[in-house]
Amino acid sequence: MRTNPPSSRPRSAAALAVLLAAACFAAGCVTIEPPAGYAPLPDPGDKAFLAVSPKGSTFAMSERKNLGGRYAGLDYWVEAFQHEKVTLGGYRLAGGKDIETAKGLKGRVLDLRLGEGAAEYTWLVAIFVRPPSTWDPGQVVTVEAGGPSAQIGLEREKIEAAIRTLP
């Protein structure tokens, strides 16, 4: 029985890792770091990524094709999202601000609220638009964090730090 010399095994493993990373990139897999103290869930359901804090706050990422292509940029998707969630969905827009990932992708974070007082719920939604290319219409990526407003207020800095890890 013939086996590969030991020196070729690390190169084979490295080649496999590169191939898997390339396949994941081509398939649209995007990774993001969860906020400190959050645990990623192995089955994120319909999300690309989902993590939960010990106190029940959630941090999730979703991706969808930007079927509007070059005509539907960040401002378009922010307006569409606000219309759906605030005008039609009953959320209050408590604020919004621009954000940029460590890799330079520009986005906007919306601070949405529902309820009042101790029962108030905060939903932070960061919206990013990856540009289209010849073979791809681009992507709309949302990174969301939700939970009781008091808890999200305490975790906001680490949530925004995690959002900035989006590649």
Image (tube, helix red, strand yellow):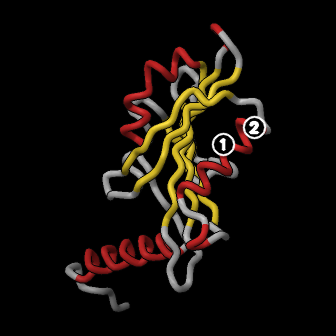
User: Which residue occupies 44% across, 19% down?
Assistant: 154
User: How far from the left and from the top, in percent, is residue 150?
Assistant: 53, 14
- Cα–Cα gap, marks 2 and 1: 7 Å
- Tell me: residue 154, above or below residue 16: above
Give the amino acid at mark 2: Thr
Location of residue 18 (image quadrant): bottom left
Report the side of 93 relative to 30 (left or right): right
Residue that protrudes farthest toward the bottom in the picture:
2
User: How far from the left and from the top, in percent, is residue 44?
Assistant: 63, 47
The foreground one among 140 and 3 is 140
User: Which residue occupies 59% across, 54% down?
Assistant: 48
Residue that protrudes farthest toward the right in the picture:
88
Counting residues from the start of the chain, the first of labels 2 and 1 encountered is 1
Q: Using the image, tell me which numbered label, if any, was put on residue 82.
A: 1
User: Which residue occupies 46% across, 51% down?
Assistant: 107
User: How far from the left and from the top, in percent, is residue 26?
Assistant: 50, 76
The foreground one among 43 and 34 is 34
The foreground one among 1 and 92 is 92
Q: Evaluate if marks 2 and 1 touch, with contact meaning CB atoms under 8 Å apart.
A: yes
- Tell me: residue 15, above or below residue 101: below
Report the side of 124 relative to 90 (left or right): left
Give the amino acid at mark 1: Gln
Q: Which residue is mark 2?
A: 87
SS assignment at label 2: helix
